[in-house]
Amino acid sequence: MSRRFGGGRLVIASHNTGKVREIGQLLVPFGAEVISAGDLGLGEPDETEDSFSGNARIKAHAAARSSGLPALSDDSGLSVAALGGEPGVRTADWAETESGRDFRLGMERVWAALGEAGARAPFAAHFTCALCLAWPDGEDAVFAGEVHGTLVWPPRGEKGFGYDPMFLPDGEEETFGEMEPERKHAMSHRARAFAALVAGCFGG
């Protein structure tokens, strides 16, 4: 049995405004007073683990220690079968530039890598999300979710964030970038991880 979140303020341990917005929307029904790590001026710890769950734990514990509040972190990424699972835990790194993250460039790099690998369609891929809820006393709980699909080019849609415009979920005709947020939330890797989090820590 995982420890229950008792309500009140909850830090979202992320500086990614898209993630903060999406997680905040999912938390609306549970009465959490959400504040982001960026709002609190917290730094971004180095993500040194080779798994999504490991990096999620690093971020959640850093935010919980610094803020003295429970903290929820998300570590997620895109894994492409033809690229041996890359970019995986380095998904954000593929979008890094000297002036910040450019996910259009990240998508172009993924597509170029597929070409260099001589891969042929369909380009199977999946998103993974690991969520960690950590308390200032060091206790935590980790939950994960996945959604499978294929990659498309050119990217389609402006409604998502990150690599959403090039990801077409299995059985769907719209990319995550084209879907209305409510529809994406019903099937995404983050929604699946969140459902497990709610069952484990919110009593839902």
Image: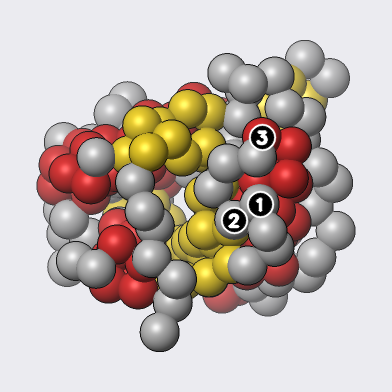
Q: Secondary structure at mark 3?
A: helix
Residue on which disc 1 sits: 136
- Give the class, few, some or many, for how many residues have Cα within 10 Å of label 1's Cα (few <14, many ≥20): some
Q: Is residue 115 above or below residue 177?
A: below
Q: Secondary structure at mark 1?
A: loop
Residue 67 — which label? 3
- Amino acid type, callout 3: Ser
Report the side of 8 relative to 45 (left or right): left
Q: Farthest residue toward the top?
A: 99
Residue 135 — which label? 2
Q: Quadrant of residue 115?
A: bottom right
State if disc 1 and disc 2 touch (CB < 8 Å): yes
Residue 72 location (% of width, % of height): 52, 49
Colour mapping used in the image: secondary structure
User: Can residue 108 be seen in this snapshot?
Assistant: no
- Name the residue located 68 percent from the left edge and 75 percent from the top edge: 84
- Name the residue located 59 percent from the left edge and 67 percent from the top edge: 140
Q: Quadrant of the C terminus?
A: bottom left
State if disc 1 and disc 3 touch (CB < 8 Å): yes
- Amino acid type, callout 1: Pro
Cα–Cα gap, marks 3 and 2: 10 Å
Q: Is residue 30 above or below residue 78?
A: above
- Name the residue located 34 percent from the left edge and 46 percent from the top edge: 7
- Give the class, few, some or many, for how many residues have Cα within 10 Å of label 2's Cα (few <14, many ≥20): many
Residue 110 location (% of width, % of height): 62, 50
Cα–Cα gap, marks 2 and 1: 4 Å
Report the side of 80 relative to 193 (left or right): right
- Amino acid type, callout 2: Trp
Q: Is residue 121 above or below residue 35?
A: below
- Give the class, few, some or many, for how many residues have Cα within 10 Å of label 3's Cα (few <14, many ≥20): some
Q: Secondary structure at mark 2?
A: loop
